[in-house]
Image (spheres, helix red, strand yellow):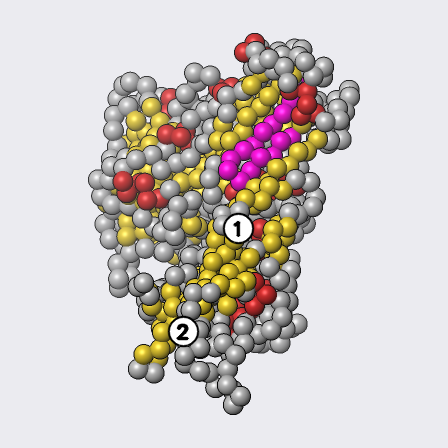
Amino acid sequence: MWKKTWLLGILMTATALSGCSSCGDNGGGGTDGGNTTADGGDGGGGNPDGSVDPTDPTLSSLTIEPTNPVLVVSGSTGVTQLFKVTGTFTDGRTEDVSGKALFSIDDTRLGLFGGGSGFTSSTTVGGTSTVRARVGTLSVSTPITVKLDQKVSDTPPPGQTPATPVPADPGSKFGGTVDTSYKPEIVYPNNGVLVPPNLGQLEIHIKPNNASTTLFELAFSNSITDVRVYLRCYLPSGFTLPSGVSRGCIYTPTENVWKFLAESNRGGQPVKLTVRSTDDSGTGKVGVSNPIAIQFARAELKGALYYWTTKTGSTGVMRYDFAGTGTTAASPVMLAKNIDGSVSCVGCHALSRNGKKLVAEVNGQNDGRLALADLSSFTADSKAKLGASRQSTFESWNPDGSKFVGVYGDSGATDFGLRIFNGDTGAYESSIPGTGDSNSPATHPDWSPDGQTIAYTSPTYKETNQRNYMGAIKMVTAKSGGGWNAPVTVVPAENGKHRYYPAIAPDNSFLVFNESACDSGTAPSHYSCNGDTDKTAKLWAAKLQAGATRVELTKANQGGVMDGSEKNLTNSYPKWSPFVTRGTGDDKSRLMWVTFSSSRNYGLRTMAASSSSENDKSTLLWMAAVDPDKVNAGVDPSYPAFALPFQDITTSNHIAQWAQYFVSNGCSTVGEGCGSAGSTCCNGLQCVQLNQDPPIPCDVAGACVCDAIPQCAPALEKCSAAAPCCDGLLCLDDVTGGSCSGSDCSCKPPCASEGQACGSSACCDGLACVTESGSSTCQIILK
């Protein structure tokens, strides 16, 4: 994937710097045109003593051809494109200087120059980039497009083999007349969905809608992508179609198809998916679906997800590592067997931000005992310790994992507000005054990533912490000298509504919460809107301030084709991935991910029945991208949601809590020791020498710590000494243009802009290196 380790980043940066300070022949012969003058000329023949005659013609400009080439790549062989650079001298003559030019491409994922002017494309990644050629202190560039034109005949996984394989040259079978009665329908995912590039397992669900169709084409297309997959219609072994559907197909992209799509289009334009269907005759009628759009986020999704499952015999907490490799399913981390014999159920849980500690409430309502585990050493056979007398039903950790906040308003409660517990022992420490009483006990606490705010639900009516109604969203903020300020109402209680489960966004600027519609009356029945898998639950957002305006996450709340007109989809238990990444727009755009549970249909997969008196359907985990800046604008910030593919879909899953790292087997997190005398780093981290920037590898006892693996940044994206640029780009200060020495830096091509120093680096297109008063800068030459 688009990720470099520290070593690759350092080597690439070193390569770029060396290319700017001494220009070799790049396989073309000579040293960049012989002697060079400050204005970029080649100096002509020169005098016998090696000096340059100022009257000799010098190189004044460069052109490159072809311009804007589009390379269409099919199969497993890359396309080669030769470039020609022509130099114009001050006396007006022109000369082919390709052999003296140093060629490069900004995004080396698209291909490479092989030591001369010949560029060979990748066969797996398409996109647009810039080709650059440098001679002396002059440079020239042109855009380049690599378009993937790949055809794939699908081979179904074991247990899903159709009667006959896909025919040879399947694309030729779609020459018949288009007939709307043959029109297939894409029922999952929803149109406009945005997914992480490392999701990998996005299913495509199709209703053929005509019994005579035997061959299908999935066409993924945009200006850089034309990937077509040919397949038979098949379903997983043992699959049962929903009522009223006689035929369906489910396709999961293979690893190579996923790379064609995700790596080429991450952070870029949407991919249009259209399905065609026909028979094998080559003359039969053809059905064409309505298209949907799929987008791929720029940055990979990281972190570990912990969620509660109600699977018979395995009720407890499961986890999945987004930074891991190879695994495609979640694994159990804490079940009832991991505590003592008095525990039959492990339920609501919370993870410390770094993923080292887990606290979970046991045996459901009216119990409130807590199990606390150190995940560094916790195994399938470990036993978690139960806390002392103080109880809690819902918990949330402070940023450093030293404390967690809990609540308990069930049977036997005497303290109904927010309560602070020790993060190492689970012992009760203090309560936050004014946050709850016996009539309105605080519940659903969420401690902000910066540690300055705790949001919670304050209900008007209560039965237990789990079942309460007509709630308001409130918050307390930390005092500068310690302690907490008086509660503030973010979203007030409202007759006929229940507002609950607040979750503060990773940038601390807003929160999401649930809102349910209640039956009419003064004290509505808890079966109507108590927040315990309530059918009417929807996701809303509000700024983290008093009296905030509510904004619905409309797209995330929306069901799919198979949900029909059903609007009550149990969109509940929202939780945030801990990271903020760049969005799909400019370098200031941002993106976050929210997970929640929902009883909506997973395309052709219908939800298992539930025995709960609250809801007759089970729920699965879903995720949606969120643009945080749209919350400030008061508009829907969400994208359509998708089902998380690693969960067991035969049971009910919810409360998807996040941690930054998947901690197991004693692995170390950020800032903790590693190396020969210490532990290994958790997935997504590297062992580096302490106080070195950029980081360098380390395996010395007492001198090494774990740090995040920096992702290299492409042209014009932000960078730093610890987060190098990709592909030989330079990390330069946005203000001074010099080498990056702070945090306000961007990746720039290996050429200098107007007013920047030159001589050791080439000037960008259309500029000349001019020496005045002893210094050389790139300037526009007016002709």
Q: Position of residue 100 (x, y in %)?
A: 56, 68
Residue at 24% in and 37% down: 549
How would you classify the magenta stretch by its main secondary structure?
A: strand
Above or below, 433 against 729 in this view is above
Q: CA distance from mark 2 to mark 1?
A: 26 Å
Q: Which residue is mark 1?
A: 66
Find the magenta span and give its range: 213-229
Above or below, 655 against 746 in this view is above
Going by the numbered disc 1, the residue's amino acid type is Pro
Say whether residue 526 is left or right of residue 3: left
Q: Reply yes or no: does residue 87 show up in magenta.
A: no
Say whether residue 780 is left or right of residue 297: left
Above or below, 749 against 288 in this view is below
Q: Position of residue 79 (x, y in %)?
A: 64, 47
Q: Which residue is mark 2?
A: 39
Residue at 44% in and 18% down: 566
Q: Position of residue 585 (x, y in %)?
A: 39, 45
Residue at 26% in and 58% down: 479
Q: Position of residue 134 (x, y in %)?
A: 50, 65
Going by the numbered disc 2, the residue's amino acid type is Asp
Numbered marks: total: 2
**Depth order, front residue of 778/783:** 783
